[in-house]
Amino acid sequence: MKGRLYGIGVGPGDPELISLKAVRVMKECDVIAVPGKTPAETYAYETALKAVPEIGSKPVLGINWPMTKDPEELGKIYRTACDVIEEQLEKGQSVAFLTIGDVSVYSTFIYVMKLVREDGHRVEMIPGITSFSAAASRLGESLAEHREMLHVVPAGYGGLRDLPGTTVIMKAGKNLSEIKKFAEDHGRTAMMTEKCGLPGERIYRSLEEMPDEAGYFATVILFDR
Amino acid sequence: MKGRLYGIGVGPGDPELISLKAVRVMKECDVIAVPGKTPAETYAYETALKAVPEIGSKPVLGINWPMTKDPEELGKIYRTACDVIEEQLEKGQSVAFLTIGDVSVYSTFIYVMKLVREDGHRVEMIPGITSFSAAASRLGESLAEHREMLHVVPAGYGGLRDLPGTTVIMKAGKNLSEIKKFAEDHGRTAMMTEKCGLPGERIYRSLEEMPDEAGYFATVILFDR
């Protein structure tokens, strides 16, 4: 009997924002997998451990996940991660792969999941609260009302587009100068959270307050209202 | 001592997809508020009650919420809802206003929250899992990878736009013919969930399978990959 792979979105970082289902599956599964060489130092594992201390006694697969955009290198990383996980599944172990935020939005899990599924294993995704939903709540703002559109774009690929409605820019830390200029040029209101719900959280309610650089977990929201 | 108003996203409908924080606040609060004349019949209340049976013994404010797009009528509805809630807050009662999905994405709570906040009351938003995150997980698909953008648009306001990346169309039930034609014309892959995670759930994995009409809780996802 082969095990099953679960991709679990553990939410934006506040351990209380994990779902009941994520908690249950983490308790029931045999092995935890986390993208990061040192699992205990990742936000995903740290967040999950605070919510479900029981996982501390389960074996943890640290999936080495260097920050690269090189397709060939990425392909190798995914294959290695897949092999490590499948070794457990073949032994009948169920594996919970933790990712911060939601599992379907820019998550590391997706790439591994596709390979594991192609190899004939059973896979289940458990959605989580996105960082932008958490940022909006923390700021006390809505992302979309009535007929407004909501756009979510990853930072760092160049070319912010002038789209009507609200635009969320994920992982914006290194691109703040460019984003601030775009917001100014297009007359947008800008707000930002950094490490929302995590230790060291910072909140910025205007373009003027926003720094020119921030860490990896920076989420910018541009409003056209 | 005035009470506090909480806006709680109870997630997409599966009671297990409620967050630990939402569960705690629902247990701690004095009064539950739900948009809908008959609260017990709303998905938000039904979902919450399954996860937290204790709320069954708490008083429930049913906020009458007719489906209208008329701004004047909407204004009156928001004001009445606000008055009903503020009456409780003035008595020192804490109120948990439940909405399906996330509280910042097309939620009924936002409009009431603004008025209540303007009147000087303390308000807190608790984010939830969106219906589109749940739909993607249910379908085993990702919403955004690498440099892809994600767009979320409400159905029924006309004029679907040809945007690169993934487009989620919310509350798409009445507009399926138009959406299907758009997807065909622009060569998009289309998938859909109806009542995702709720009794009567239906899943459609292609344009060909999709019906021409569906209920209120239909979420369409258009992919350009």
Image (cartoon, coloured by chain):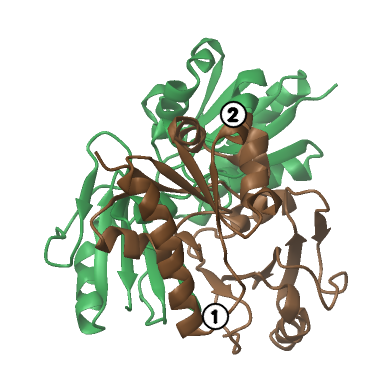
Chain colours: A green, B brown
Q: Give percent across and percent down for residue A35.
A: 49, 34
User: Seen in the image, is B124 located left or right of residue A4?
Assistant: left
Mark 2 residue type? Glu
Q: In which quarter of the image is the C terminus of chain A?
A: bottom left
Q: Quadrant of the N terminus of chain A?
A: top right
Which residue: 47% across, 41% down?
B31
> In terms of depth relative to the viewer, which is nearer, B117 or B142?
B117
Q: Is residue B140 visible?
A: no
Around disc 1, counting alpha carbons within 10 Å, would you say few (fewer than 14), some (14 to 19), or many (20 or more)? few
Mark 1 residue type? Leu
Q: Give percent across and percent down for residue B216.
A: 71, 67
- The chain carrying label 2 is B
Q: Is residue B92 visible?
A: yes
Residue B122 - label: none
Q: Give percent across and percent down for residue B20.
A: 50, 32
Which residue: 70% across, 29% down?
A86
The local secondary structure at tag 2 comes to helix
- The chain carrying label 1 is B
Dot 2 and dot 1 residues touching (CB under 8 Å) = no
Depth check, mark 2 against mark 1: the one in front is: 2
Q: Residue under circle 2? A: B54
Residue B163 - label: 1
Q: In which quarter of the image is residue A117?
A: top right
